Amino acid sequence: MKNLFQKTLFDYKKGLMFWVLGILASDLIITSFFPTVKKMPELMNEYVESFPKEISVWFGDLSSIGTPEGFLNVELFSFMFPFAFIAYAITVGTNIIAGEEKNKTIDILISNPIKRSTLIIQKFLAMATLITIFCFIAWFGFVLVTPIMKVNLFNLAQMCINLALISIFFGSISILTGSITGKTGISTGFSGGLAFITFLINGLAKLSSDFESIKYISPFFYYSDSNALFNGINIMHFLILISSIALIIYLSIYFYKDRDLGV
Amino acid sequence: MAINQGEIFGFLGPNGAGKSTTIRILLGIIKPSSGTVKILGMNHLKNSIEIRKKIGYLPGEFLIYPNLTGSQILTFFSNIKNEYDETYVNVLAEKLQIDLNKQFGTLSQGNKQKIGIIQALMHKPELIILDEPTNGLDPLVRNEFYEIISDLKDEKRTIFFSSHNISEVEKLCDRIGIIREGKLITTEKISEIKSKQIQIFEIEFSEIQPRKKDFTLPNIENVDVSNKTVKFTVIGNPTHIIKKVSEFEIKKLITHEPSLEEIFMTYYGDKK
């Protein structure tokens, strides 16, 4: 362990194995249902029509569930994967910054010659690396299950990049709140709450033209609007998410570098 | 307040006086509301990284990552410090008889503190800051720690030693500063404090039962009456006390030099 980046990855080594297995299992289990769904289009159409149309705004276009991309969008990428990965990113983001203060390890760490900006950057990079590994594993799982369900792996890779960005975005929010407050409860609560509210906003904006303009404040708009599984990444949305993350980390450093720690 | 190079400076004060807050300011963990600090000739905020390379810090309760082994903790911090005297680490580990291969979270409080001691000293820092370092240590480990501090004293390293345990400060330090309610009351050499004319008297009378008010005299403090015995502290010349008590028949008279703790209580006990 040469630095905080390596040390943070080391801390999550054990949990990483379980997550990797969980993601691969999700890929496999969800995919195993696809042949059944595909074989019964009429039954599925009936089933889909029984849902209120509004539900599509949050859980993906149900009418495309008979295609591999539409199936994955509804089953994994609209809700399950984003919220699982965001929850993980928030947990890591909270523990690595506010957690050091809660566990009172920050005094020893800061008494050593390490810049506060370096601390934030290395820990952020570790969180981003963990999320990137998960997203790669999610993609790789579908490479393994290609015999069951043929999906456009290039578009899927772009969807996974979007998934990584939205997760890292909220992980960074927890780093920012941890940097400002040093409180784990606030860090988790605020970041989780923000994820939930912005998810709702993105759906509500699609339901009513009166609310349409508010979609731009939701990171989920930039995550889902291009429908990357069908169309690939929207470069502008990609850059907005990247820039937002960079801004959040810059603000984290700004607030953290002069704050009294562990008080 | 200034601390000289090569001295062991005891930073004394009751719990909550501001000792740890002062240390956290020195380490740059919190910012001072006013005033400036210079460490090793450098401004502690402007040159914080340079200063922290030359500092070793040990708190009363060394809390660090429970999932790492002692060896991993020391390797991690040696990489951050960018300096590491492996031979010295092995000497300390052997002296403290600590197994570095055990996970930190499974260690006893004393063994955790031993890892903390090595962490603070592994890079042979110029300045060592100790914040109540013997809290929670059993007497054996405490003595091992005192031996290490004595070795550092011989090497002329500068040590800032915060404690509320006056006897250990008396044993180790050259000079002390006393802090109370966030304010520095005084700084003095241990030898000067001990040279103050303070004596403790314990007198047992044969017949009379002494009353506390009989001993409300100049230069007398801490009067404690119990049955036919009175115990008090005299600051300065005790002639007038001797004259007064000699009017009565005395069964036993004991007088002794006070410990630093007794001096502390007498001389600084009520001072603000």
Image (cartoon, coloured by chain):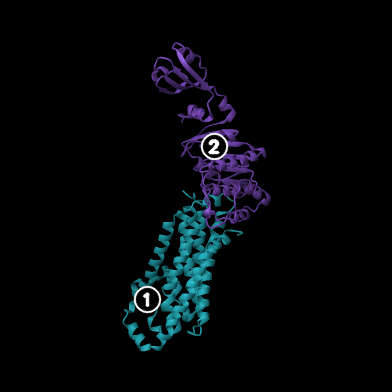
Circle 2 sits in a helix, a strand or a loop, which is it? strand
Chain letter corresponding to the colour purple: B
Residue B99 in view of the camera: yes
Give the residue displayed 56% in from the left and 33% down from the top.
Answer: B170
- What's under tag 1, amino acid-wise? Val
On the image, the x and y values in percent for residue A28 come to 47, 78
| Subunit of label 2 | B
- Whether tag 2 and tag 1 are in contact, CB under 8 A, the answer is no
Pointer 2 local density, CA inside 10 Å: few below 14, some 14–19, many at least 20: many
Give the residue displayed 41% in from the left and 64% down from the top.
Answer: A192
| Subunit of label 1 | A
On the image, the x and y values in percent for residue A62 come to 38, 81
Task: Give the camera-side residue of B52 and B189.
Answer: B189
Q: Residue furthest top?
A: B247
- What's under tag 2, amino acid-wise? Phe
Task: Give the camera-side residue of B180 and A229.
Answer: B180
Residue A238 in view of the camera: no
Give the residue displayed 38% in from the left and 74% down from the top.
Answer: A58
Pointer 1 local density, CA inside 10 Å: few below 14, some 14–19, many at least 20: some
Q: Give me the disc on residue B11.
A: 2
Q: Colour of chain A?
A: cyan
Q: Give me the disc on residue B249.
A: none
Q: To which residue does mark 1 refer?
A: A57
For this view, does B211 lie left or right of residue B125? left
